[in-house]
Image: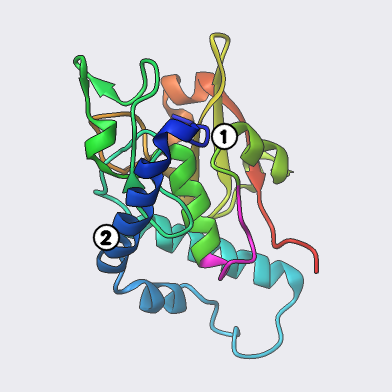
Amino acid sequence: MESQPPSPDQASGVGRRRMLGLALGAGLVPALTTAAQSAQPAHAAGPSAPADRSAALGLRVAAVATAQIGVPYAWGGGDRLGPGLGFCDGENGYLNGVCLGESTVGFDCSGLSLYCWYRASHGTVELGHYTVAQFNLGAPVDRDALAPGDLLFFSRPDAPLHHVGIYAGDGAMIHAERTGTLVAQVEQVLDLPRWAGEFAGARRPGPHPA
């Protein structure tokens, strides 16, 4: 699920999130550079057309996302540094009446997508930690043109644009779903009734203009 930036009374928690995110993120993706390099096209050593560079970036995003599989969900967790300490807000961050957010280091859905794009782009793509903002930032992508790294958005009448996941290729999505779960990969996501019925479109972020 999405989250908005924490309120002032959560400032100390944000500081802890960043410190823990640095420590945990460093240990979670030690092989990221190798994975990203292996995702590069064979001709990447020479000059690349914009489409080739975009495809290579998307593959790196998917590689970063794959490296996060198994990280806990934390409401409000995650930023450009990696997994972070979450918090509880209203009904969010709770499981069976227990606040897990404030004691869990991990990602929520938009925290995962912003981290993957920031890290894979070497800081040239910075998404807001809010699903609606990420939807409005990227370029629309048709379903039959999806490529690794694209962001998939989901909506319901009672919860517009409530969720975002990262397209991993071959119909799969990597996402952080809800409190009590781990970052996971869903196969053939848009063929599943639940997700297909809520699919609101796809977006492809890009580097900020110079």
Q: Quadrant of the N terminus?
A: top left
Between tags 2 and 1, which lies in front? 2
Residue with the mark numbered 1: 131
**Type of residue at label 2?**
Leu
Q: Where, by quadrant of the figure, is residue 28 drawn?
A: bottom left
Q: Could you classify mark 2 by the number of other residues whose Cα lies within 10 Å: few (under 14), some (14-19), or many (20 or more)?
A: some
Asked if residue 171 can be seen in this view, the reply is no
Q: With respect to residue 63, does 134 lie above or below? A: above
Position of residue 189 in the picture relative to residue 134 (left or right): left
| Residue 123 shown in magenta | yes
Calculate the distance from the C-alpha at mark 2 to the C-alpha at mark 1.
Answer: 24 Å
Residue 117 rendering spot, x and y as whole percentages: 54, 57
Residue drawn at x 52%, y 50% as measured from the top left: 114
Residue drawn at (56%, 36%) of the image = 130
Q: Which residues are magenta?
A: 120-127
Query: As rendered, which of 66 and 176 lies closer to the eye?
Result: 176
Residue occupying the far right of the picture = 210
The x and y percentages for residue 90 are 39, 16
Q: Quadrant of the C terminus?
A: bottom right
**Which residue is painted at 66% across and 90% down in the image?**
46
Q: Residue at x 29, y 73 (%)?
A: 30
Which residue matches tag 2? Answer: 24
Along the horizontal axis of the image, is 117 left or right of 71? Answer: right
